[in-house]
Image (cartoon, grey):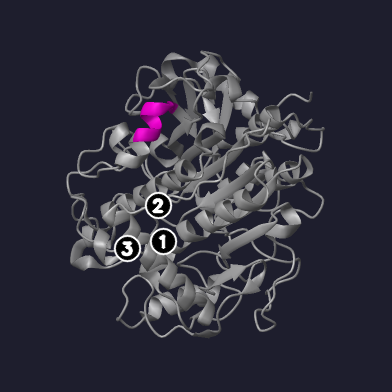
Amino acid sequence: MKHILTLIVLITISLTSCQTGKKNETKPKEKESSKPNIIFIMADDLGYGDLSCYGATKIKTPNIDKLAKKGIKLTDAHSPSAVCTPTRYGVLTGRYSWRGRLKKEVLWSGYDRSLIEKDRKTIGNLMKESGYATAHIGKWHLGWEDEEPVDYSKGYLGRGPKDLGFDYSFVTASAHNLFPIVFVENHQLVSNLKPMDYYVYEPGNETPDEIYEWHRTKDKGPMMIADDWQPDKVDSLYGVKAKMFIEDHIMKKTNQPFYMHLTPEAPHLPNNVPDFMKGKSEAGTRGDHVQMLDWVVGDLIDKLKELDIEKNTLVIITSDNGPRPVGIDGNIDGKYLADYEHDFEHKSAGNLRGFKARLWEGGHRVPFIAQWPNKIGAGQISNNLICLTDMMATFSEIIGYHLDATMGEDSFNALPIILGEDKEIRENIIHQDYEGNLSIREGHYKLLGESLYNISKDLGENKNIAALHPQKVLDLKQLLKTQVENKRTAPVN
């Protein structure tokens, strides 16, 4: 409890500093490492149309827009799944999640056992082995230990971030909407747990009977929440923890590079934000949450400048999957899962078809922006295809780490694209939806079930051209079958 209260004070100081423009002027003299610092920021349910640099007008994201102006923006980046957990697995391992035990859906609580296998190396492992200081801060949603249900009464959780290469971790047990709702720092519960006595999506209201029943069938443990949980401070707290890790590291080991895996909850429901951000967007509570994400990113970039390490830091921001259309206030009667009412004239997926959880482009085509001063030219735009599983091979190339045949089965080196080269790094990509269905894209053609689309001419996926290209349909079906059976798509170096 004292720990959280101290952090809340730090958050308040951070918010005040940002709003008044006052900065800590103390800067260590930069000793640039031969290897860059890397910060990978993956938002939760951030859509292709949610950022102003991707066309949003009802939501303003000036800090993220600056990253795009100073670096590169990708228009054909994809998450390996249209939902959360499998993408998080895919990013860290460079492997499609459906190759492992999770064939569909997500892990439904923090009581689930660890999804990443014991003998599987992650980005965290390869970074640490290469001399990096490593941190994972934010949403976890990948399970703990090797038996379930995970026992939270002991206060300490087994196999998790530290076993996957992260020296420091400050994460949710699962997510800010999945039980138990509590922060875990270096595998230690930060707060005591109490029974949940209100509806997480509508604070103050009793949890509906059907939701209780849903949790009884999906969860592997009780509905519990931290006794000092403050939902509007979650992403602010991640930002504070990220800055604390960086500052502490730079002050002590200025010549050692660091890797940070930062995974905010924004803008996933429930869309709780601090008072200073409420009503700031023109897209309802979800729009405010996107702008909160932008604030966190801006505050972090300010810290890099203050410490004089921005030039030697690669910053990437992307999303784990496509968006929901709106927050709860966009639904009839303002109820979670109620019928869709309006979208505030904001298109969270841009002009793409579909949303989160689906195989349509809106489910998995995501924003992707990279800034690396002196390495990436300013104001670039790339239309080359990448998948977030490509981060393992990309980061390995940057730091000079050799991936063996047991690593990064579906990870291609995207560094040339990130640096601005017009280069095709992968010929195809496999998409996955919530139900575990797979589709495949090769070049401009995307096979979705029995339908075929030419993405270059029909990004909205409105015209099924399967009847015009029957052989292409057969070829893509065979390619999908072959790539699933081959157990890897990426070459072995």
The residue that mark 3 highlights is: 273
Residue 489 can be seen in this image: no
Residue 369, x across and y down, in percent: 44, 33
Residue 296 is marked as: 2
Per the model, the C-alpha gap separating discs 1 and 3 is 9 Å
For the point 54% across and 42% down, which residue is it? Answer: 40
| Residue bounds of the magenta highlight | 66-75
Q: Amino acid at mark 2?
A: Val
**Rendered residue at 21%/49% (across/down):** 343
Tell how many labels: 3
Tell me the quarter of the picture where residue 438 sits: top right
Q: Are marks 1 and 3 in contact (CB under 8 Å)?
A: no
Q: In the rendered structure, which amino acid carries the disc numbered 1?
A: Ser
Separation (CA) of disc 2 from disc 3: 12 Å
Left or right of 282 in this view: 475: right
Judging depth in this view, the residue of 493 and 125 nearest the camera is: 125
Residue 458 x, y percent position in the rendering:
34, 22
**Mark 3: amino acid:** Val
Tell me if residue 41 can be seen: yes
Q: Secondary structure at mark 1?
A: helix
Mark-to-mark CA distance, 1 and 2: 7 Å
The mark closer to the camera, 1 or 3, is: 1
The residue wearing badge 1 is 236
Magenta-drawn stretch contains 74? yes
Badge 2, how many Cα within 10 Å: few under 14, some, many 20+? Answer: many
* CB under 8 Å between discs 1 and 2: yes
In terms of sequence position, does the residue under pointer 2 or pointer 3 come before the other? 3
